[in-house]
Image (cartoon, rainbow, N blue to C red):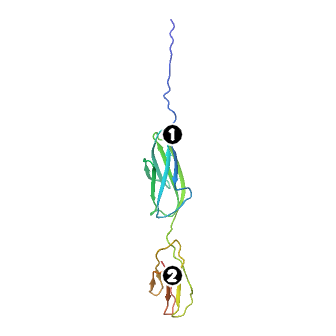
Amino acid sequence: VTLTFLFVTQSCEKDENSSPSCEITKLSQGDTVIQGEVLPIEVEAEDSDGTVEEIRLFINDKGVSSTSEFPYRFQWHTNDSVPGSYTIKTVAIDNEGAESADEIAISLINYDPLADFTVDTTGIIVGDTVHFIDQSKNEPENWFWHFGDGDFSSEQNPSKTYYSAGTYDVTLE
């Protein structure tokens, strides 16, 4: 009598999980943005062998938000952020825990008006009028001039007549 045994083995191994894709599509590498703006950040993410479960947002390595709802969008309110360089990073995580990331560097600048002005003359005699010319940067909408003698003006390019001899420190805010 001959007994023949046939052993069949079946592999329980599953194909290796692929990481999802992750790409920041709104905001770009090297962008310069103005402090105080609300910045939209959009991410495209796909998973070829499963589902994208979550997208996480990091600003300078600090986790600030996450979403699992498509389309993947975030808003960064920059009011309280200090001007400087920032790294925006997003991480896509799939249904099996695989991750991929994308990151960009941007610059946040302060766009507050910078007061500056010139005058048409600095050597006057009593009763002469001085014309002040606004040369402020970053598009101011309001001006407040102090003429050094208690008078002031809110005009963009005011004139001032001095009726007393002296030295006057004029400022523009």
Answer with mark 1 or mark 2, whichever residue precedes in sequence.
Answer: 1
Most foreground residue, 2 or 20: 20
- SS at circle 1: loop
At a point 50% along the width and 48% down the height, the residue shown is 44
Most foreground residue, 25 or 101: 25
- The mark found on residue 142 in the picture is none
- Give percent across and percent down for residue 115: 51, 76
Residue underneath mark 2: 157
**Above or below, 26 relative to 3:** below
- Give percent across and percent down for residue 156: 49, 79
Alpha carbon distance from label 1 to label 2: 63 Å
- Give percent across and percent down for residue 162: 49, 91
Q: Residue placed farthest to the front in the image?
A: 71
**Above or below, 8 relative to 41:** above
- SS at circle 2: loop
Q: Mark 2: few, some, or many residues within 10 Å (few <14, many ≥20)?
A: some
- Give percent across and percent down for residue 146: 47, 83
Q: Amino acid at mark 2?
A: Asn
Residue underneath mark 1: 48
Q: Amino acid at mark 1?
A: Ser
